[in-house]
Amino acid sequence: MGLGGRYWSLFLGDLLSNIGSHATQTALTLKIFKLTGQSSAHMGLAALTNMVSGLAGSALGGVLAERTNRRILMMGCDLVRLLLVLALPLTERVWLLLALAGGLLAVTAVFSPARQAMIPALVPTQKLDLANSLVSGSQSAVFLLGPLLGASLFVAGGLRSVVTVDAASYLVSFAFLWGLGQVAVPPEPALAEQRRFWHDLAEGVTQVGTRPDLALLLTLSMAAGLAVGVVIPLLRPFVTEALGSGDATYALILGCFGLGGLVGPWLAMVAMRWVGLGRALLAGFFLEAALMLIWSRTTVPVLNGAVFGVWGAVVFALIPCEHTYLHARANPAMMARTFALMDQAMYTTQIVGVLVVTAVGNSVHPSTLVTTAALVYLAVVAASWRSQGARLVRGLRRLNEPVPGPGPEA
């Protein structure tokens, strides 16, 4: 494929550690559910803890990835995650388990923007669409394999067996990163000027806000995050109240989403090369919102699962399109901060969505809430379709083509 051994080292290490992380998160959910007497309130608290931790970690990670050596930062994250995961079997206290789980998510959120910003230094520009599609495909595989592995190991040997596998995955990731050697990064003035953290954070927000195309992607990410934040806590109640089904249907729907996700990266490659990168990206947001709306109104379990599978394909096609666009158009000196800001937008609005469900979920039917969230998402996409930012995004057809408007240095 012409991506080079260094890219594959980063890819494989990240894939294995992500499978381990998702296995641990699944096992922790089962552990906390058991310890709290199957408390739904504690499940909501766990979701909020993870989202808040991810938000804090991504804000820190975006700046750290441009102030320090990204490879060393990621290796440090693997060591911290190793220590945190080894501490999990040592306690039965729910609050401490939640704190450790939040710490793991926070450190992973520090790791992610550094990893994503490193990819352009490892592969040729014309191969970025392929590199990002493969990363998206690995994420869909993680979505399938991580929970299955975590649940199986937890049932067979408890939390300790899951922790053993996860700890090994971080050691493997550390070894792959060690083998990468030095990775070149764009010069960053902040390294010499030693500016304050908040200055760098604000600068990243400002540069996105003054770029119409990046501001548009931030807005669409926030709309997507809000909608997903509504869906996550309502998915299991939706299966019962809207579909009249139980755990088997819930598992089927999740499996359909994961299987669809395996197709998504291939769809992204086809779309980016046939209709153009920018058009594929905007179409992905529109299709996700439309499919969410269709899914919320589909009450036949088999058809609902099919729609959820197509939705999964679109989600995992949208991810590499967005990442490839950011690699091509974001300021290279602020690449990590740009990726981190998009993550923060998702985390923040997901938290808002969960809080909305917490406030009104017992008085409003799940399908009504999901339909409303989908309509809001669709309205935001439609309202932005003819904006200046949308025109700039649509203008980027291929990675080696300039587009009208401000470039990466703006």
Image (cartoon, rainbow, N blue to C red):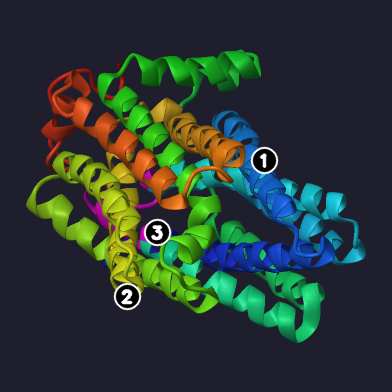
Disc 3 is placed on an element classified as: helix
Secondary structure mostly seen in the magenta stretch: helix
Give the vertical position of 367 relative to 34 (above or below): above
Location of the N terminus (image quadrant): bottom left
Q: Secondary structure at mark 2?
A: helix
| Circle nearer the viewer, 2 or 1 | 2
Q: Amino acid at mark 3?
A: Val
Instruction: Name the residue at 70% across, 62% down.
Output: 29
As for residue 225 lying within the magenta part, the answer is no
Q: In the image shown, does 42 or 261 lie closer to the viewer?
A: 42
Is 214 in front, or is 11? 214
- Identify the mark nearer the N-term, 1 or 3: 1
Identify the amino acid type marked 2. Val
Neighbor class of circle 3 (other Cα within 10 Å; few <14, some 14-19, many 20+) is many
* 349 left or right, relative to 31: left
Which residue is drawn at the image coordinates 53% and 48% (left, top)? Answer: 182
Would you say residue 128 is visible in this rendering?
no
Q: Which residue is mark 1?
A: 53
For badge 1, the amino acid type reads Ser
In depth, the one of 384 and 81 nearer the eye is: 384
Region of the chain picked out in magenta, as a range: 120-136
In the shown orientation, is residue 257 left or right of residue 317? right
Any magenta on residue 132? yes
Which residue is label 3 attached to?
Answer: 135
Q: CA distance from mark 3 to mark 2?
A: 29 Å
Residue highlighted by disc 2: 302
Position in image of residue 341 (x %, y %): 48, 30
Percent position of residue 108, x then y: 62, 49
Element class at badge 1:
helix
Q: How far across and down, in percent of the image, does residue 135 sit?
A: 40, 59
Residue 170, image quadrant: bottom right
- Mark 1 or mark 2, which is nearer the start of the sequence? 1
